[in-house]
């Protein structure tokens, strides 16, 4: 604990609880600890540079949130003319964000906090996250600018000339198909690339964007002295020098060997010359990178000893915010569905992504994205349950586990996992049928969605073991009957966790953990005071038998559906 000078605000707390009411001068034991009154206890900041906004959360040592703020890019920085924080270019494939918008957003956020009376001197450590895959290209000479920032001016004024590329490619970009094909060829195929980097080649992954820059705008590439991810760019602003890319966010580049935890030479060579120098050495996500630069000390009153813990990607930060345990799985049932898995042994596949784990060095996490989530459930609810979630739930209650062998696939739009489209219904003899009763349709949709989540999670190395928990979040986690199907299909208890800001909170937790990670204290030990998830469903006794059988048929039928789907521009070869 920090020592504070005694003043009128300072409370005296006896270690042995014996002299609470006694005046300080009369304290018999004299074994009291001078503890600052609540306003002076240390704080931990978590920032999130997401697609549409920059957010911050401050927590105290008890993990209680004491401050929250945000800057919306579209409305608060309208001169960048972004929509949803991005520019979609005329080819519809290229999607970028102005890097100076992110810099200016940080100026604005810190000014807001200062005006709100936030006491920066109490921040003992900070960390953060960024939208994954986005790349920032620092111009030659920018390191010097960063190291000599003048506290009399804002960051935006001083970094105007700091970037060789003004419009950073972001995760929504899909313009680098050619580079993806080239990389897969150089690595020995899509699966081989996935085995090395955790994912086959994806257009949005930073390595393929770097390669595209080199091939299409080589002057800008030549003018670059350092390449950051959005996360490490943000950390660099606080450090006043280039921050290392952390292993977890670095896994979203198609460049990192996720087992060796270093850049893969094959991938570097296939992407750009001398790339390891431009990227710097990657570091563990728990690493303390240094202290905030004197700019932040003098301009905002940060303490000189305030530590900067490596920033990471938004999905890894969210895993930390949800406090996933080994063997757990988190399912977010939002506009689209995402699945996070904690993995000990990764088994990268052609779908989904395996990243190094952000909170435990030896572990991994997997991320699967499913585009047809709540919007498809809403469409079927409107067609089969007159727009009522209650009637939709009743249909689930009234139909048997396994739906009498009927299996459905519902991809209203081209799915990511697996890359298939259309609605496909099969009866218990695997014969294609064109329609079902509304109740059968509703159960087939929900069972089909969760069988798919399980199939693809298992392909990445996930297995259900005793003690496995499924944590559900997002809008549809309010629906008990949907969660019951989730519990049955996974044969595991389902818990709900109410988190509006898991990325920011995860970053603040990581800041706190970063201070003690080197002494071997685990992340879960540090966050044990956070509220526990609530148990909402347990699996039906027959669930295991029903769905183990069904999963095998589901996998075969999915292959049939895939054979009918045209390949997408995302290279699956
Ligand atoms: P986002 O991904 O945009 O943050 P949310 O996590 O807020 O979205 O989820 C919104 C979705 O939740 C809506 O599209 C809606 O279909 C779904 N939803 C809300 N309430 C229910 C319910 N009772 N049952 C099933 N789905 C629901
Ligand atoms: C993950 C991905 C997005 C971004 C933006 O692979 O592309 O989730 O991290 O949130």
Image (cartoon, helix red, strand yellow):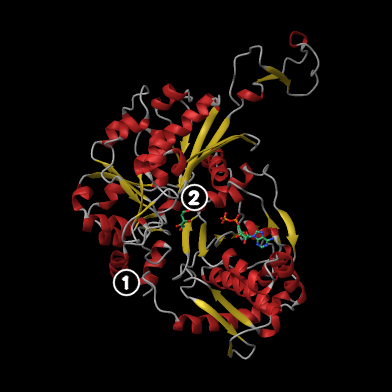
| Secondary structure of residue under mark 2 | helix
| Residue 559, disc | none
- Disc 1 marks which residue? 188
Please say whether residue 544 is visible from this viewpoint.
yes
Is 415 drawn above or below residue 358 in the view shown?
A: below
Which quadrant: the C terminus? Answer: bottom left
What is the secondary structure assignment of the residue under circle 1? loop
Q: Residues within 10 Å of mark 1 (few under 14, many from 20)?
A: few
Mark 2 close to ligand 2, CB under 8 Å: yes
Where is residue 165 shown, x and y percent of the image? 28, 46
Indicate the quadrant of ligand 1 in the picture.
bottom right
- In this view, the residue in front, 403 or 463, is 403
**Which part of the image, by quadrant, shows the N terminus?**
top right
Does residue 393 appear to the left or right of 563 in the view shown? right
Callout 1: CB less than 8 Å from ligand 2: no
**Left or right: where 438 falls relative to 507:** right
Q: Does the CB distance between marks 2 and 1 fall below 8 Å?
A: no
Up-down relation of residue 271 to residue 502 (above or below): below
Q: Position of residue 337 (x, y in %)?
A: 56, 62
- The answer to whether 347 is drawn above or below residue 288 in the figure is below
Q: Residues within 10 Å of mark 2 (few under 14, many from 20)?
A: many
Name the outermost residue toward the front: 386
Front position among marks 2 and 1? 2
Front position in the image: 153 or 383? 383
Residue at x-position 47% and y-position 22%:
301
Give the residue at the far top of this rendering.
25
Camera sees residue 49: no
Q: What residue did someone put label 2 on?
A: 314
Relative image position of residue 352 (x, y in whole percent): 48, 66
């Amino acid at each position: 604990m920090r020592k504070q000078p005694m003043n009128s605000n300072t409370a005296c707390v006896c270690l042995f609880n014996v002299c609470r009411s006694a005046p300080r001068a009369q304290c018999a034991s004299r074994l009291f600890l001078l503890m600052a009154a609540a306003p002076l206890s240390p704080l931990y900041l978590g920032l999130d540079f997401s697609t549409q906004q920059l957010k911050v959360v401050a927590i105290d040592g008890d993990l209680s949130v004491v401050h929250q703020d945000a800057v919306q890019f579209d409305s608060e920085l309208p001169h960048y003319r972004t929509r949803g924080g991005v520019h979609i270019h005329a080819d519809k494939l290229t999607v970028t964000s102005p890097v100076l918008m992110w810099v200016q957003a940080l100026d604005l956020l810190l000014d807001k906090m200062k005006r709100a009376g936030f006491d920066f001197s109490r921040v003992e450590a900070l960390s953060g996250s960024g939208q994954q895959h986005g790349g920032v290209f620092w111009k030659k000479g920018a390191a010097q600018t960063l190291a000599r920032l003048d506290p009399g001016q804002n960051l935006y004024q001083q970094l105007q000339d700091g970037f060789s590329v003004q419009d950073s490619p972001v995760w929504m970009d899909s313009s680098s198909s050619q580079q993806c094909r080239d990389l897969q060829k150089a690595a020995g195929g899509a699966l081989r690339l996935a085995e090395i980097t955790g994912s086959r080649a994806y257009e949005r992954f930073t390595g393929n964007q770097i390669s595209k820059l080199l091939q299409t705008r080589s002057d800008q590439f030549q003018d670059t002295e350092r390449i950051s991810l959005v996360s490490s760019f943000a950390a660099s602003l606080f450090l006043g020098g280039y921050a290392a890319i952390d292993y977890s966010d670095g896994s979203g580049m198609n460049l990192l060997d996720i087992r060796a935890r270093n850049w893969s030479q094959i991938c570097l060579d296939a992407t750009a010359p001398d790339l390891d120098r431009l990227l710097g050495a990657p570091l563990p996500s728990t690493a303390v990178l240094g202290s905030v630069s004197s700019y932040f000390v003098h301009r905002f009153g940060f303490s000189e000893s305030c530590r900067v813990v490596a920033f990471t990607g938004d999905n890894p930060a969210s895993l930390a915010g949800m406090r996933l345990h080994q063997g757990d799985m988190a399912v977010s049932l939002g506009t689209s569905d995402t699945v996070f898995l904690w993995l000990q042994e990764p088994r990268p596949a052609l779908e989904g992504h395996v990243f190094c784990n952000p909170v435990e060095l030896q572990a991994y996490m997997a991320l699967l994205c499913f585009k047809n989530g709540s919007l498809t459930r809403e469409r079927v609810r409107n067609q089969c349950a007159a727009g009522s979630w209650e009637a939709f739930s009743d249909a689930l209650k009234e139909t048997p586990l396994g739906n009498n062998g009927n299996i459905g696939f519902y991809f209203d739009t081209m799915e990511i996992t697996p890359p298939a489209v259309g609605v496909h219904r099969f009866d218990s003899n695997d014969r294609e049928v064109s329609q079902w009763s509304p109740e059968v349709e509703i159960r087939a949709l929900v069972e089909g969605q969760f069988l798919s989540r399980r199939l693809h999670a298992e392909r990445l190395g996930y297995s259900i073991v005793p003690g496995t928990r499924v944590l559900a979040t997002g809008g549809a986690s309010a629906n008990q009957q949907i969660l019951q199907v989730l519990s049955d299909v996974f044969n595991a208890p389902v818990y709900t966790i109410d988190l509006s800001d898991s990325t920011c909170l995860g970053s603040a937790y990581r800041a706190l953990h970063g201070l003690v990670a080197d002494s071997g204290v685990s992340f879960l030990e540090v966050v044990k005071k956070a509220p526990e998830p609530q148990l909402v469903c347990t699996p039906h006794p027959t669930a295991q038998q029903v769905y183990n059988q069904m999963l095998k048929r589901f996998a075969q039928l999915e292959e049939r559906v895939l054979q009918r789907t045209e390949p997408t521009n995302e290279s699956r070869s």
